[in-house]
Amino acid sequence: MRPTLRSLFLALAALVAIFVLGACQPTPEQIAAFQEMNGLTAAASEQDLAELRHCESTGRYDISSSNGLYHGAYQFSQRTWDDVASRWMPWLVGRSPANVTPHEQDAMARALLLEAGPQPWPHCGARAFSN
């Protein structure tokens, strides 16, 4: 499901609030509020994310794949990360997923799940969301 114009406007408003109130680095509380306000928390439970993280990276947020193509707890490629970030959290575009906070990685995984379901994680997505 692609974000609607209204949801993009709300996301932009939330980002402005985050930057104004958070001095450019959003707090975990601000990220949580952003996720709730934009419906991202409905995309996956904490348990679902934990299972996906464990399968993808043994739960490590700072990891990169041995070939250097996939990064962070959810093993995003930089291209996918930047694509999703451009719609949801533009301040993350160009940053390696392995170098951002766990809260930001969780929010981006939820955003991708909201847009594409578990398909971007062919093996681990099927395991984490089989219930």
Image (spheres, grey):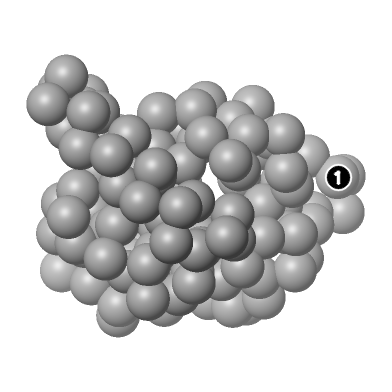
Measured from the top left, where is residue 120 in percent x and y? 43, 39
Question: Residue at 12% across / 26% down in the picture?
Answer: 6
Measured from the top left, where is residue 62 in percent x and y? 75, 69
Amino acid type of the residue tagged 1 in the rendering:
Gly
In this view of the protein, can residue 84 be seen by the observer?
A: yes
Residue at far right of view:
67
Q: Nearer the viewer, residue 103 or 61?
A: 103
User: Is 77 located above or below residue 124 in the figure?
Assistant: above
Local crowd size for mark 1, using a 10 Å CA cut-off: few (<14), some (14–19), many (≥20): few
Q: Nearer the viewer, residue 57 or 105?
A: 105
Question: Residue at 78% across / 39% down in the picture?
Answer: 69
In this view of the protein, can residue 1 be seen by the observer?
A: no
Apparent side of residue 23 relative to residue 51 in the rendered image (left or right): right
Q: Residue at label 1?
A: 68
Q: Nearer the viewer, residue 20 or 37?
A: 20
User: Is 36 located above or below residue 82 in the figure?
Assistant: below
Question: Residue at 33% across / 34% down in the picture?
Answer: 12
